[in-house]
Image: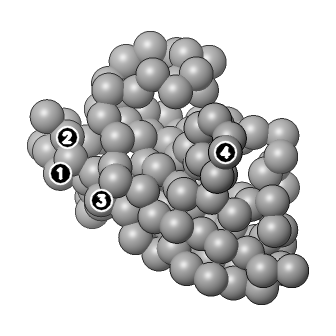
Amino acid sequence: QVQLVESGGGLVQAGGSLRLSCAASGRTFRNYRMGWFRQAPGKEREFVAAINWSGGSTYYADSVKGRFTISRDNAKNMVYLHMNSLKPEDTAVYYCAADPGGTMAAFTTGRSRYWGQGTQVTVSS
């Protein structure tokens, strides 16, 4: 069982930066693929970024590539999403997700086993 708690959301102007954090419980955290999804009002949830168990492999949605960076600290059971050059279209609720198996491609489909409650990110123009 893994529990995920996101933090770090807020209101920021376009061009600004935020860092989202995801605190995970569970002794097997280091075995899980982790990632971030987001859902804007009236839209479906979409994949943002993912990272493998060691942190050696990452994958990003085209819409955030070059602006967002995902990282993890297995010693602290933490996953981070560093968001730079934020745009109004980045406004959404951001969710942390964890899954013990599968491929990176499968992870991007949004069928992870564990999810956090979400944190709101609002980017003003």
Distance (Cα) linking label 4 and label 1: 31 Å
Q: Is residue 78 visible?
A: no
Contact? badges 1 and 2 (CB < 8 Å): yes
Across and down, in percent, residue 74 comes to 32, 52
* 15 left or right, relative to 43: right
Which residue shows up at 53% across the image and 46% down it?
Answer: 36
Across and down, in percent, residue 32 comes to 34, 33
Q: Earlier in the sequence, mark 4 or mark 1?
A: 1
Which residue shows up at 47% across the image and 75% down it?
Answer: 8
Residue type highlighted by circle 1: Ser
Which residue is disc 4 drawn over?
42
Q: Earlier in the sequence, mark 4 or mark 3?
A: 3
Which residue is disc 2 drawn over?
2
Which residue is disc 3 drawn over?
5
Q: Using the image, determine if residue 23 lies above or below residue 47.
A: below
Residue type highlighted by circle 4: Gly
Q: Using the image, determine if residue 23 lies above or below residue 56.
A: below
